[in-house]
Amino acid sequence: MRRTTAEPCPHAEVRARLFDARRGALSDVEATLLADSLAACPECARHAERLGDLLDAAAGASADAFWPEGATESGRADLFAAIMVEVDAERVASAAEEEADERPSAWWSTPRLIAAAAVVLVASVAALAAFVGQGGGSEGGAPLTAPGGLAAVAGPYSALERATVVPNLTVYSSPGARYIITEGTPRRIRVESGAVLVDFLPVNGERLVAEAAGTEVSVVGTIFYARVDATAPEVAEVGVLVGAVEVRRPGAPDLRLGELRRVRGAGPSEAIPAAERQALERNVDVERHRMMLGALASRLPAPAEAGPLAEVAEIEPVAAPAEVAKAADPEVGAVVAEVAAVQPGGPGAEVVEPAARAARGAARGVAASEGRAPHTLQPRPAAAPVAPRDVAAPDRHGEAPRAAGGAGGPRPVEVVVEASPASEPVAPEPPEPVRADPRRLRDEAREALRAGDASRAASLYEEALTRLGPAAPEAASVRLELARLYASRLGQSGRAVEHLRAFVDRYPEDVAAPSARQQLCRMLGPGAGDDVRCRGRVVP
Amino acid sequence: MSEEANIAAAARGDRAAFRALYDAHVGRVAAQVGRMLGPSGDVEGVVQEVFIEVFRSLPRFRGESRFSTWLYSLTRHVLYAHLRQRTPRIDLVALRQMATPDGPWARLDAREKLKILYTAIEDLSPEHREAFVLYEIEGKALAEIATLTEVPLNTAAARVRRARERLRFVLEQADGASSTTAAGGRA
């Protein structure tokens, strides 16, 4: 029996009972009648079989079946790490905001805060004094040591002393290092000797200024270090582990110092040697810092101005920012350099959801290493009301009005050719040269997709389509697969449009044709009116 | 440590205790989230949001209900918020697979069938989707669903009925297209 979509099913009553039959909710008589009806109606029997298949697949699915394809066991296990990063970021942001609210505009105006800072510094002095066997220091750090010069200072990176100054600022200092922290806006750290590694997380655009041998470092959200050798106190070394900084130096071109680069005095920049980098990274969790940056960035109240260094990875000459005065500290003499703020953001800023996902992804080992300086982000969407009964008044959302539509009514639906999984292929393998069987090609394409290799999958599907020929029954599905891959995974909307057009033209009565047409017209955007397939349609 | 002790410790910020709670409950939360969102949903993201919310809310958990009940309710709220914020998406490939001829249909794997089912119910409201999932997939009784979702029994029944109609309608559309397709000599 052939039926078109416009005709109502003549066995609607039979089909309506299939759900109850599956649950065993029919009486024996009803069940017998239903079985007879199904025997008399092959279409209904087919409908029943498929309905049962779908519901059985869902009922029998474990939680694993709902996780993204290709999600690794270890990646899923790391979800807890991602959760704790979000939690920590929230706490850091909250604590830092509270602290900032209480911080005076001038460091000397609130004795309580000076005391708080002093406690941290005294604690650092005590720890360092115990380590080097000496005490003292006017405000922080131990007396000047490091008689072996810079090489000697580089050695003890593995033994840096950690001091959390405020929730979003942690300082790691080498034995014998001497540094001074001054409260204020911005907070300042002056490194007088030794090596100081700083892990600073920005909250609400807060800045940190570090000085070393006249070098003034102003940063937002980086991990960097500054080092001064007692035997050459006019020379500062600055290196960056995460993010980038801008350096202004007298007698030398200003420069931007990118990730994993360092510079000494007026010399040229160079890569941080691998061994030194490893030693530094043993002190600070770089990946966690990146994740926290992502999580904190998603909490920014508004996009920050594009920073000059958002895309910077290498040193290059730059103009000195006018608002940053040359250092005039009489104690540090003539050598003055300056590192300008790395603002969180840039032209290619992400929106909050991708950022949040990036942070999650980083915690799960996905694209973590691709994070650089903090991005400009839209504010996180207002938190949804979460009110378990035991916590607050119950949310009687059950019948809450919706923007449009209900279960059976019209509702705005964005038709997208499937959401893409998280990551793109890293190292696609070349396809095998000859595959005569299109079915095998499709199987291999699915396999490639499961492995996260969308590019190879598309190549295999294209080959399958060629071999199938336009009249083959499977060609329609292959075209949709290709449209989905090009649109969602490979960013080739032109190719997706080609396949959607071909699909709509060849299979106008297909069940997916209306949605495919809608998707096509949506992708064409303002140009949809020029396409005959979209004329007279409202493009969402 | 008992769960009560873990709850108390986690509420004070003890990460090890929170980890223990997470390990004990993440499977159930993931299943709840997965069944509501389907295989193409952001299950990981929502599970993450749930536990972040748990960490925030634990200090206010007064123990007036079982922790699992409280967690279930919290997960529901996070899910509803997520479903209301997102834009429904139709998976064209899954949509077309509904009209797959019998032979290829038999070869579809469980994951593909899951995608088809959730595509069919994609534009259901969160309320109807939840009722459908609880009744047809989890096999719960209407009375239980009414309690869980805090609505009268007849409301729960009406939601299930509407969701069934929706699924039947979509499948019948696919059946019709499939018949047309078969008559035209295509799959």
Image: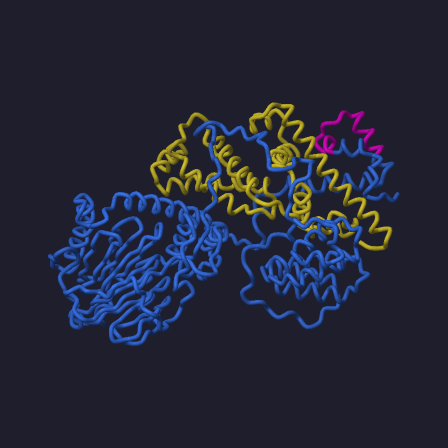
Chain colours: A blue, B yellow
The one of A531 and A223 positioned closer to us in this rendering: A531
Residue B156: tell me if it is visible.
yes
Q: Quadrant of residue A60?
A: top right
Q: How many marks?
A: 0
Q: Position of residue A489 (x, y in %)?
A: 60, 59
Q: Where is residue A205 in the image (x, y as percent from the top left)?
A: 35, 53
Q: Where is residue A218 in the image (x, y as percent from the top left)?
A: 29, 60
Placement of B153 over or under A283, stated as above or below: above
Q: Where is residue A202 in the image (x, y as percent from the top left)?
A: 34, 53
- The residue located at (54%, 39%) in the rendering is B79
Which residue appears farthest toward the front when viewing the image?
A322
Q: In which quarter of the image is residue A374?
A: bottom left
Placement of B120 over or under A347, stated as above or below: above
**Range drawn in magenta:** A19-37
Looking at the image, residue A76 sits to the left or right of residue A317; the answer is right
Taking the magenta stretch, the answer to whether it contains residue A36 is yes
- The residue located at (78%, 26%) in the rendering is A28
- The residue located at (67%, 45%) in the rendering is B119
